[in-house]
Amino acid sequence: ASGVAPCPSPEGFASPRRRPGRESSERPNPLVNTVVTLTRRQREDHPTTLAGSRRPPLVIIQPVAQQEFVPAVAEVCDGLGIREAAAIVGISFGGLQAVHVAATLGHLAPRLVLHSCAPSTLAYPDTRAEAAAGPLGFSPWTQGLTWRAIRRMTTSDRGLRLMMSTLSTLPVGSWWPSWTPADRASARATFAAMGSGSGFVNDVRQGAPGRSTYRQSVLGSIPCPTLVTASRHDGGVRFEHAKDFVRLIPKAELFETDAPSRFYWLGPSRPALSHAIHDFADK
């Protein structure tokens, strides 16, 4: 997650960028997790599109690279009247966008916070099996079925416990009792709200080993103080990514949380993490 939300549907948006040979007059393009920017002239030219017409004059949706989120962040903040911010925050794959905003939009990023983020210069997903299976289960065409199955499974304590066991490097029985009923309800609400559209596949593509040098150059150019938080028990992202961020970002510091799973905001470790963030923001 980062400061930019994906487009919920290709309907109701227009973009001047064309994909050769692919127009959507007949059928919406399935790539829906993208940023679509419109100039003032384009807004005037397509008023019915912006009004939410079910058949806009033109809908062209394309995958975007992480750096292409930067002008969208700037435009959204400008439209909301946000002239300065306390920090830019990246979570998981959202770190891809957050580091680019931090390197480019100084007025919006006096500080940078990266929670359980990947990729660093290290490739992500962390294993070949995850790299092969992830795009199959979370492609634009299969992710809806995958998330529905996960939502159904996590409605019960047994199913939620099974799901969380895949997001922790610890035996789930060693920490499951530390979660309160409120923690479990929050975890269920998180899974219930999840969806990936085409965003997951797009992000995995940008975590490839071949882009490592480019990611290193971006991380080395970040001028602001940075707080990197991570847990060695995170079953979704190896702790080495956090260490790599701290090694390459000039003003970075690491806070190692004791969270027993990828859901670092749940459980008894939350107060310590909250204090660390407040202390960092007050510096």
Image: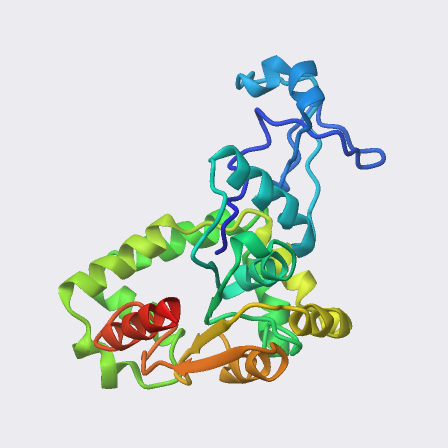
Q: Is residue 33 above or below residue 12?
A: below
Which residue is at 55% across, 81% downward?
246
* Front position in the image: 101 or 10: 101
* Front position in the image: 244 or 195: 244
Instruction: Give the residue furthest to the front.
Output: 283
Tell me where residue 132 sits by quadrant: bottom right
- Residue 134 lies, in percent from the top left, at 57, 64
* Front position in the image: 151 or 197: 197
Residue 10 is at least partly visible in this image: yes
- Location of the C terminus (image quadrant): bottom left
- Residue 147 lies, in percent from the top left, at 43, 52
Instruction: Give the residue furthest to the right.
Output: 20
Q: Is residue 72 above or below residue 128?
A: above
Is 198 left, or right, of 179 in this rendering?
right
Is 245 left, or right, of 161 in this rendering?
right
Which residue is at 63% across, 63% downward?
204
Residue 235 is at least partly visible in this image: no
- Residue 199 lies, in percent from the top left, at 58, 51
Q: How is the image coloured?
A: rainbow
